[in-house]
Amino acid sequence: MDYSSTFWKRAAGYTLLLCVGLALFAGWRTVSGAEGTAVPALTPTPAVAGTAVADSSLTPAANDVPVLTDNSLAPAPYPHTYQGKLPEHNYETYVVERGDTPVGIAERFGIQTETILGGNPQLSQESSLLQTGVELIILPIDGVLHGVQPGDTLEGLVSLYGVSAEQIIAYAPNNLEFPYRLYPDTKIMIPGAVREVFVWTPPSLESVRGTGSGVQPLVVGTGTFIFPVGSRNFTQYFWYGHPGIDIALAEGSAVFAADTGTVTYAGWNIYGYGNLIVVNHGNGYETFYGHLNGFNVVPGQVVTKGQVIGSSGNTGNSSGPHLHFEIRINGNRDDPCWYVGC
Ligand SMILES: [Zn+2]
C-alpha cells in the first residue's frame, strides 16, 4: 500500500479547498462592491455556500442573517504537524482456484490455517468467500493483520490479542517508534495472534420446550446423521474460519433434518446465516441449516430424522445458492464430514 500517495492526495485536497474558498470570497467582495483589496487571514474562513453568496448580494437586509460558519471546512495551514512513520507491509496475494482448501493454501505458503483468517477478516463470518477467483492476502508470518481504527492504542491491541507489546514493536514493517502512535486506515501486524471468530449461540432447548401448549417432551436423536440435502457439490469445507460445510444446490431444494430433535430456531439470522433453522437433538448435538429460502417448521416443533424442514436458498452472506450445514456438540463446532461423510 502506498501511504505517501494518500498523503499527497490529502494535501491536494486541502489546496483545492483553499483555492475554492478564496475564489468564493473574492467573488463576494466584487459583487458587493467593496474596494478593499487586502486578503484577510486564513482564519476565520466563512464557509459560504453558493446560494448564501447570491442572497447577501441581492438584499442588503440579508446581511443581518447570521452566516453559518463551519470551521471544519477551513484548511489548516499545516495539516500534519507531526507524522511518524507509517507501517509498510509486504504480502503476497493468492487467487483461490477450484478445489483449494484453506489447509492446502496454508501449507503451500508455510503458514497456519488460522493465518489465512488473520489476513482476511472478511472470511470470519459465514461468508462462503473461499470460492474460486477470490483474492486472499497471504501474510509473511503467522498472526493477524489488524486494521487500525480511530482510538486504537498499542495497549488496546495487546489486551485484544493477548500478545506482548514487545512482539508488536519488534516486527519491523510495523514501523513503530516511541511514542508508538497508531494511525487509522493503516494496518498493524500482530505476530502470533489468532483472529477471534464470533460464535452465535442459538436458543437453548429448555427455552423452546416451554412455549406453546405446555412443555414438550424431551426428544432425543439417534446420534447418527443423514446427509441433509440431495447434492454433494461441496463448495467449502470445515476450517477454523468456517464452522461447517457448504453444499451448492438449486434454490428451493428440500432440506432434511439430519436427525430427530426439536427446532430451537427458525428465522432470519443477522450473523450471516440468512434464513436459518437450528435443530437441538437432545443429546448434546445441534445441527444448523443456513441460507434457506423457506421454512416448514417453527421453533419448539419436534422433527424426525429425514423430515423436510425447509427449502434451500441464497439468503444472508451467500454468493450463490447453497446450504450451510453445521454440527455442534455441547456448543463446540465439529467437522460435519466426520458424521455424514464428504
Ligand atoms: Zn458455510
Image (cartoon, rainbow, N blue to C red):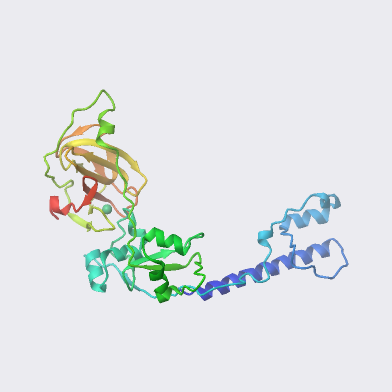
Foreground residue among 235 and 175: 175
Asked if residue 254 is positioned above or below residue 156 in the image, the reply reads: above
Asked if residue 101 is positioned above or below residue 271 in the image, the reply reads: below
* Residue lying at the far right of the rendered structure: 35
Q: Which quarter shows the N terminus?
A: bottom left
Number of marks in the rendered image: 0
Task: Say whether residue 182 is left or right of residue 40.
Answer: left
Q: Quadrant of residue 295?
A: top left
Foreground residue among 246 and 154: 154
Task: Say whether residue 11 is left or right of residue 86.
Answer: right
Identify which residue is drawn at 51% across, 59% down.
151
- In the rendered image, is residue 109 in sight? yes
Identify which residue is drawn at 72% across, 56% down.
69
Foreground residue among 261 and 19: 261
Asked if residue 119 is positioned above or below residue 331 in the image, the reply reads: below
Residue 241 at x, y percent in the picture: 29, 58
Q: Which quarter shows the C terminus?
A: bottom left
Task: Say whether residue 220 is left or right of residue 102.
Answer: left
* Residue lying at the far top of the rendered structure: 213
Foreground residue among 166 and 38: 166
Residue 313 at x, y percent in the picture: 28, 46
Residue 108 at x, y percent in the picture: 23, 73
Residue 322 at x, y percent in the picture: 26, 51
- In the rendered image, is residue 89 in sight? no
Q: Quadrant of residue 299?
A: top left
Identify which residue is drawn at 48% across, 75% down.
2
